[in-house]
Image (tube, grey):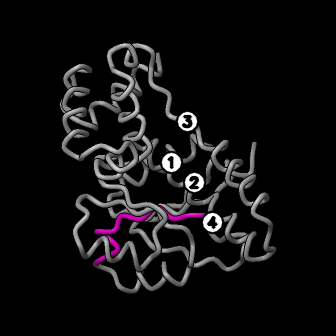
Amino acid sequence: MSEAQRYLVAVLMADAAAARQLAGALQSAGMLPLTAVPPAVPRPQTAADLPDACVVDLAWLLGVPDQQAALMDLRRPVVAVVDVAGPPLVALAADLHAATLLVRPVHDAQVVAAVRLAAAVGAQQTADAAMPRSAEDKLRAIAAILQDTPPAVLPAAMRELLSSREREIVELLWSGARVASIARHLRLSPHTVRNHLKSIFRKVNVRGQRELFEQWQGRAGR
């Protein structure tokens, strides 16, 4: 088992069922989830108890200033999850220096990938602070992180239905990208990306992103 698979992850969600589901997904990925009901930022006594990353429901955190302060004091990589990316929640994510902001609906696999990358980058930054290294060393470290993050692989049946551009968009969507960032990455307009998404949903016979990912998972498991 690699080091990345042993990450200790604090899951801070007010919805206990959602926290349990995500904890199960993290555990299946080889990580060690920490959950509490009601949620609470961990207060480790030793460095060994310090989480490598935290998954946080920002709507819950916004209403508990003491927990906000505790999380900021913890200084660990944060994967923030929201229902709507409104200004107060985006501002809170910025205050936390969140590594990623995921907007529901989001699949557990996306959260797991975001946690793995955030924790790996956080570990790398800690190592860099302790021992500055050359640019070549840093590039090798980034390559190692990317190798540890499983690539998105579309099921063969789904690939046959989609054009090459549509496959690119689905794979970026799976990685957690939103319409605006997909448009920038592919040098398209957001309107064009939305039209591609409508075509994708029609071809795969789903009503939206959540059903698309559920079908992806179902076909991948066959």
> What numbered label is drawn on residue 91?
none
Q: CA distance from mark 1 to mark 3?
A: 12 Å
Q: CA distance from mark 3 to mark 2?
A: 12 Å
Q: CA distance from mark 4 to mark 1?
A: 15 Å
Q: Is residue 152 magenta?
A: no
Asked whether the residues under the numbered discs 4 and 3 touch, taking CB atoms below 8 Å apart as contact, a structural biologist would say no
Amino acid under disc 3: Pro
**Picture quadrant of residue 211:** top left
Q: Quadrant for the N terminus, please.
A: top right
Q: Which residue is mark 1?
A: 112
Which of the marked residues, 4 or 2, is nearer the chain's N terminus? 2
Q: Which residue is mark 4?
A: 122
Q: Which residue is mark 3?
A: 151
Q: CA distance from mark 4 to mark 2?
A: 8 Å
Asked whether the residues under the numbered discs 1 and 3 touch, taking CB atoms below 8 Å apart as contact, a structural biologist would say no
Which of the marked residues, 4 or 3, is nearer the chain's N terminus? 4
Amino acid under disc 1: Val
Residue 175 vs 53, above or below: the answer is above
Q: Is residue 56 magenta?
A: yes
Q: Which residues are magenta?
A: 52-62
Which of the marked residues, 1 or 3, is nearer the chain's N terminus? 1
Which of the marked residues, 1 or 2, is nearer the chain's N terminus? 1
Residue 61 vs 221, above or below: the answer is below
Residue 163: image location, x then y, percent: 34, 21
Amino acid under disc 4: Gly
Q: CA distance from mark 1 to mark 2?
A: 9 Å
